[in-house]
Image: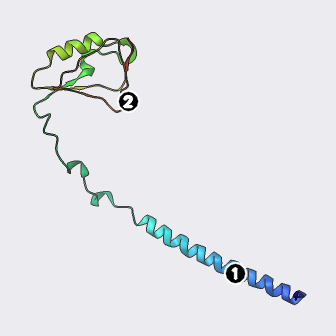
Amino acid sequence: MFRQYTYKNKIQLLSLNKTYISSMHHIFTIVFLLLYLVGSSQTIDPSRSVNWTLAGLKDTTTLGFLSINLNDYGLDKSGLTPNDSVINAILNAVPESGAILNFPAGNFLFSKTIRIPSHVILRGQGAESTPIHYEP
């Protein structure tokens, strides 16, 4: 019922284990090389890539809008001094044709409500770079 293992049987088992481990090593090596080849084939030379910034629908709703660089108007970028009066003066001077107010990178503090007309766009340098804080 129970099989008796002799020294010869143990050597045969060890030999089989070595063969099994060796064959698994070869299989893993082949799988790794195949995955490496597939992964490296996804790299495209930059000279052959497509400039996707030219694709898609172009924004024509802001054609004719005045682009205003708020860096030229002395806004406080530290977030310590409110910028209400500066922004209100700029908004009052915006033409009816519309304007894009370009905020530079920095923290901007406002302490009063600002009414932004429908023909004005506020544009920053990104959510992390241009936070706008309101503290009444």
Q: Badge 2, how many Cα within 10 Å: few under 14, some, many 20+?
A: few
Left or right, 24 with reference to 34: right
Q: Up-down: is 32 above or below 128?
A: below
Helix, strand or loop under label 1:
helix
Tell me where residue 134 sits by quadrant: top left
Residue 104 position within the rendered picture, expressed as x and y whole percent measured from the top left? 31, 25
The C terminus - image quarter: top left
Helix, strand or loop under label 2:
loop
Q: Residue at x 79, y 82 (%)?
A: 14
Residue 60 position within the rendered picture, expressed as x and y whole percent measured from the top left? 13, 39
Tell me where residue 91 sits by quadrant: top left
Q: Amino acid at mark 1?
A: Tyr
Tell me where residue 9 sits by quadrant: bottom right
Q: In the image, which disc is placed on residue 29?
A: none
Q: Up-down: is 103 above or below 57?
A: above
Left or right, 41 with reference to 2: left
Residue 43 position within the rendered picture, expressed as x and y whole percent measured from the top left? 38, 61
User: Disc 1 or 2, which lies upstream in sequence?
Assistant: 1
Residue occupied by mark 1? 20
Residue 54 position within the rendered picture, expressed as x and y whole percent measured from the top left? 20, 49
Q: Amino acid at mark 2?
A: Ser
Residue occupied by mark 2? 129
Circles 1 and 2: CB atoms closer than 8 Å = no
Q: Up-down: is 36 above or below 14?
A: above
Q: Badge 1, how many Cα within 10 Å: few under 14, some, many 20+?
A: few
